[in-house]
Every structure is written in C-alpha cells, then in structure tokens.
C-alpha cells in the first residue's frame, strides 16, 4: 500500500536528532514552557519573518486565541470560507462570534474574494482566509478589503507552514497567522501543537495571556484592552506571589509541550528541503498525470505552494477512490462536507446550494499520495494507475 501520508519515514530519516531532542527534554526535568519552547518560538518567528510567535496546544486553539486577541467576541461576525476543516469556523464560534461563510473558487479551493464585500455588515470584525492545500489565499485583495472596512485579517495557515505569497511567508501577511503542528501537517509534531504569528505587539501580549488562563501582567494588559481602560502594569504588586496565580480574563490552558518544541526545532531545519521535495513531486504529477477525466488544481502566480496535499478533481470521485484502493494506493478527501452544511452549524440556516463551489469540491476532489519521502517507484505507480483509470 502506498500511503496518502506517512510520518514514520520522516522519523527514520532524522531518528538520531529526534531521539536526542526527546532525551534532552526528559533529562531537563522541565516539560512545559521552558527553554525548548522559547527557543522554538524564536526560531519559528525568524523563519516566518515576524516579530512574535506564540506556541499553543494545537491549531484550533491558535485560531481561537488569535481571534480573541484581535478583540473578537460575542456579537461579532467573522467572514471565512465554507471549504475548510471544521475547526476554522469552530474557533470563531468558540471565541463567541458568528462565522459568516463565503464560497471558494472552484479551481483553487481558496476563498472567493469577489464575494467577501457583500457579506460585510456593521458587525463584521475580521476576515479569516484559509491557505488551503498549502497555497495562500489572494492576500493582496483580502488585505485591501480589510483596510477599507477596518477589519482584522487572521490567516488560517494550518496547511501552509513555509508557503509563501509574493515572497512573504504564510502567517506573516495578515494581522495574525495560525499554524497547526498536527502530526500529518507539513511541519508536524509527535502529538498536537500549534503556533500564532504576528508583528503586532498588542495581539502578541493578548495571545500570551489567553494561552495561560489570562494571568499575570499580560492578563492585566488584556483586561485593560477589553475594557478600554488604562492599566498601570508597573504598579501591580503580586505580594511576592507568582503572577500566574492572578487572573484578569478568562483564558485557556493551551501550551506546546517541551518535547514537541524540541522535535519541531529539529524539523524546522528541514522544512524548506521537505517543502521543495513536495513541490518536485507535484511538478512530476502536474506533468505526467494526463488522464483527461482528471483536473488539477490551479496555483496562483503569486504563490509558492507547499502541497500539503495534492488534489485532483473528477466527476466520478468515489469510483476513483475504490479503484485506487484496489491498486493499493492511498487517497483522501479534503473535505467531504463543507462547513456551512455541518450539523453543528445548522442553526446558522445555510442550505445545500448556497456554496456551489465548496459543495462541488467536497463531492469531486481527491487527494493522492504526497509526502517528501515518497519514492520514485511509488510516484511512478501512482501516475500509471491514474493514467490507466477509465471511469
Ligand atoms: C488542521 C487544521 C486546523 C486545526 O489544527 P489542529 O492542530 O488539528 O487543531 C485548522 N484549520 C485547517 C485548515 C486545518 O487543516
């Protein structure tokens, strides 16, 4: 079986360094927010080209915390795309706001920027585009609209670590970026993890507060922001007690473990190489898959994508899945049900037909094996099987 994704081959390729990193943490006796986390945050901020990076427990928390740090909560609306992983919209709801869905463009899966303005109301506070499949949304257009209507831009870069738009890394283009380190993402931990990136100190300080129970000076700072009052941090006296026991806003416990940070530090040094490898494989697929019943995704000229997944679309998607299965080739569907049709959001009142392109993608696309360690032989087998498929 050729897997759709495979993370153990990656482990084998850097086993010694990963084992060393894990053992270093185990011996250190510090397992939560210590040197490894602080070092990794610094490395990642530098890699991404931003001033601040705040690591958190997972990509979903990254989104929720980033939204809250942008001052978004009850009564607010956030415009996002119906074609994404559920948690994009779940995070908006968890922050207390309402997700407002816009359809995607059919041949990219990216938010249709032509349809954003018509969904803006006086309650709209932010646009949350998704860099789906590892290529950035049309960020110039989104930033222009955001500027005109004074909205924040939160990038869901969960599938796009290291991708670039006009030379700028995903996560550095809006006001704040959110990245997931779920094991099968292109920069994956060995468990859950996520990170928030920003150049904005106000957002940074509020993210720092929300990830640890709204406590300490960052918590007090956030309290001041929420209530629109001046707080004098230099006059706070914790009476000799640890600031973490003084809580100013309701936050979360959402931290990256030291072990995950140590592993991610090792992996980050390989990320560009792995992303290039993904692009090489995609180029081979682009050139050599020539079955006329299969269409490929369009890549915007501004983008340097990282191919988190490689997507094909076809009228007979489910037949193709069965065929690939029979040929011992893994495949996946991203995602089988667009968010506006998820039961969890039924109260928002969307109907089938509201987002035709998202619905089309949900029913007609398939992801084929894509990870840097795919062998030439496996790539050949995938191409051959696809080219021989007769729907
Ligand atoms: C994976 C993913 C997330 C959530 O990340 P987790 O780390 O699994 O919480 C959010 N948005 C998109 C687009 C994703 O692919």
Image: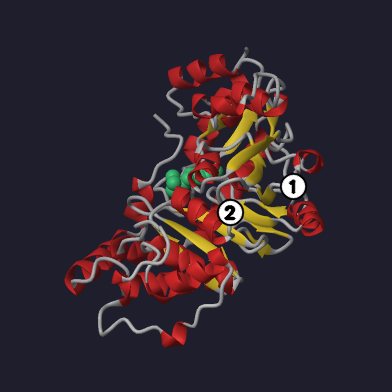
Residue 128: percent from left, percent from top: 64, 48
Dot 2: within a 10 Å radius of its alpha carbon, few (fewer than 14), some, or many (20 or more) residues?
Answer: many
Q: Quadrant of the N terminus?
A: top left
Which sits earlier in the primary sequence, circle 1 or circle 2? 2
The residue identified by callout 1 is 122
Q: Nearer the viewer, residue 323 or 38?
A: 38
**From the viewer's perspective, is 301 left or right of 192?**
right
**From the viewer's perspective, is 264 left or right of 279?**
left
Quadrant of the rendered structure where residue 194 is?
A: bottom left
Residue 80: percent from left, percent from top: 65, 42
Q: Nearer the viewer, residue 14 or 41?
A: 41
Instruction: Give the colouring mode of the picture.
Output: secondary structure
* Numbered disc 1: secondary structure: loop
- In the displayed structure, 83 sits above or below 234; it is above
Q: CA distance from mark 1 to mark 2?
A: 13 Å
Residue 257: percent from left, percent from top: 31, 61
- In the displayed structure, 296 sits above or below 135; it is above
The residue identified by callout 2 is 72
- In the displayed structure, 334 sits above or below 232; it is above
Q: Quadrant of the C terminus?
A: top right
Visible residue check, residue 171: yes
């Amino acid at each position: 079986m050729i897997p759709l994704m495979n993370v153990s081959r990656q482990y084998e390729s850097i086993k010694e360094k990963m084992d060393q990193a894990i053992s270093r943490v185990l011996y250190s006796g510090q397992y939560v927010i210590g040197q490894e986390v602080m070092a990794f945050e610094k490395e990642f901020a530098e890699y991404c080209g931003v001033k601040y990076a705040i690591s958190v427990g997972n990509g979903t928390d990254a989104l929720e915390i980033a939204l809250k740090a942008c001052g978004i909560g009850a009564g607010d609306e956030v415009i996002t795309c119906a074609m994404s992983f559920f948690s994009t919209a779940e995070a908006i709801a968890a922050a207390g706001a309402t997700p407002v869905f816009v359809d995607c463009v059919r041949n990219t899966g990216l938010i249709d920027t032509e349809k954003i303005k018509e969904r803006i109301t006086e309650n709209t506070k932010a646009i949350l585009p998704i860099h789906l499949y590892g290529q950035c949304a049309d960020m110039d257009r989104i930033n222009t609209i955001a500027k005109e209507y004074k909205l924040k831009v939160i990038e869901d870069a969960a599938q796009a670590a290291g991708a670039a738009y006009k030379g700028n890394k995903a996560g550095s283009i809006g006001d704040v970026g959110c990245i997931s380190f779920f094991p099968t993402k292109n920069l994956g931990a060995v468990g859950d993890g996520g990170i928030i990136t920003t150049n904005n100190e106000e957002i940074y300080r509020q993210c720092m507060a929300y990830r640890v129970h709204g406590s300490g000076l960052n918590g007090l700072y956030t309290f001041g922001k929420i209530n629109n009052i001046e707080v004098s941090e230099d006059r706070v006296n914790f009476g000799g007690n640890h600031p973490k026991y003084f809580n100013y806003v309701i936050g979360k416990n959402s931290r990256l473990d030291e072990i995950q940070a140590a592993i991610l530090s090792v992996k980050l040094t390989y990320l560009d190489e792995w992303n290039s490898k993904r692009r090489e494989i995609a180029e081979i697929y682009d050139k050599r898959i020539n079955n006329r019943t299969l269409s490929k995704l369009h890549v915007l000229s501004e983008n340097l994508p990282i191919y988190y997944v490689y997507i094909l679309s076809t009228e007979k998607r489910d037949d193709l899945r069965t065929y690939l299965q029979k040929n011992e080739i893994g495949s996946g569907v991203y995602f089988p049900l667009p968010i506006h049709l998820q039961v969890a959001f039924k109260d928002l009142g969307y109907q089938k037909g509201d987002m035709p392109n998202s619905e089309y993608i949900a029913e007609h696309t398939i992801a084929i094996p894509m990870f840097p360690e795919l062998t030439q032989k496996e790539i050949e087998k995938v191409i051959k099987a696809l080219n021989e498929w007769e729907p």
